[in-house]
Image: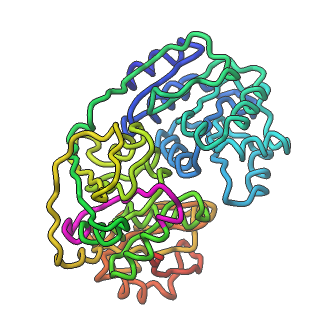
Amino acid sequence: MQEEALAAIPAEKETLILSPTGSGKTLAYLLPIVQLLKADSKRQIQAVVVVPARELALQIGQVFQQMGSGFRATCSYGGHPFDVEHRSLTEAPPDVLIGTPGRIVDHIENKSIDLTKTPMLVLDEFDKSLEFGFSEEMKFIAESMSSLKKKVLLSATEAVEIPDYMNIVAPKRINHLTNETVKGLTLKEVVSVEKDKLGALKTLLCHLGKGKSIIFANFRESADRIASYLREEGISCVCFHGGMEQPDREKAICLFRNSSVNCLISTDLAARGLDIPEVDYIIHYHLPNTGDVFTHRNGRTARMNASGQAFVIMYINEMRPSYLPKMLKEKVVEGAPLPPEAEWATIYIGKGKRDKISKGDVVGFLFQKGGLQKDELGIVEVKERYAMAAVKSNKVQQMLKKVADEKIKGMKTKFELVKAV
């Protein structure tokens, strides 16, 4: 798929890429886009990448940075100060703007950016943007790009119509979708004798023991309710949904990604786009309305040739949707102990990229000043204003005492344990 995209995007005016979640679509379009960028752009935005969610924008920005192309990319999304973005975009327009539809429209209307000479537009997960109700915003962005010469649309489902306002005439189609179940995935059914499935969910998590699980619910309120119940029962977890503030969403994903908690309860916001490797179990607390979404959820596990398991919790009288395939019955025995506590904990460091802090700075500091050994430090993530690092749980308090009065790169800052709340 990446090889086909690398050949098609430079040659074609319109490219439609259909490929499953986790198949590498980001690099599939970033590689050819970078090849088309010009070094003497005269401070013009050369490409716009529109995405449905903030986390996906940040993830694409990180991939772009890791490519080391020498070109600049800026992420633009709601949930943090508009003025900061406005100043940055006005003073130094990037080569590539990656953002959510509403925030990009805000910048166009406030004249932070001028897209009239921008030749390339990428709509990543455009079907999800349509589902989230961003059609008018995407139309506004497309119509603002009067010099638009190249359009790239990406989706993980074929069951969506391309909006008329995109003026797509004869796109080059790169279709790598398949109706087959995710390779390496085992589907299992767990029966709940109660209509309220909370008890069955707890029993299942205790039965599974170790391993990382994403639990999907259909509503934000349900996700919050599940999380509250599990915490009361002694199972550590985090929530992730569109009703949360952006810093809380970022914290939740970081804690789950670095294994400081092994249970993430989410709406379908987590079904696609997020970079969360090594998920062992998918649990459908609620079933989605369509088979496509069911497939996307299951695609969070069994990625990159790994194996994984997906569980559907079914109330005994619940109607079975037509898309649901045959599943193995999982006999879950009550009375298993609670899942073990996570072996990692996360610390917050109050300095980030804007303070010229790099991942190497954090690692060196925690080794030298925190007294950590190589196997006692896990994933380190550096954001704009702060950093987070996973530390072995049995070492974290000792390490925090050692660094309490230390400075990182000569700067005094806050070091504290991040709690899964």
Figure check: 414 above or below 214: below
The quarter of the picture where residue 258 lies is bottom left
Percent x, y for residue 142? 72, 28
Of residues 65 and 174, the one drawn nearer to the viewer in this rendering: 174
Outermost residue toward the right in this view: 110
Q: Is residue 219 magenta?
A: yes
Percent x, y for residue 306? 22, 45
Figure check: 24 above or below 391: above
Of residues 5 and 17, the one drawn nearer to the viewer in this rendering: 17
Of residues 83 and 294, the one drawn nearer to the viewer in this rendering: 294
Residue 367 seen by the camera: no
**Which residue is drawn at the image coordinates 45% and 44% (left, top)?**
289
Q: Is residue 232 magenta?
A: no
Percent x, y for residue 21? 40, 38
**Which residue is drawn at the image coordinates 57% and 75% (left, top)?**
410
Percent x, y for residue 370? 39, 80
Residue 21 seen by the camera: yes
Figure check: 408 above or below 87: below
Magenta segment = 205-223
In the image, taking residue 359 as reference, residue 46 lies left or right, namely: right
- Is the N terminus in the top left, top right, bottom left or bottom right quadrant? top left
The quarter of the picture where residue 265 lies is bottom left
**Which residue is drawn at the image coordinates 61% and 65% (left, top)?**
245
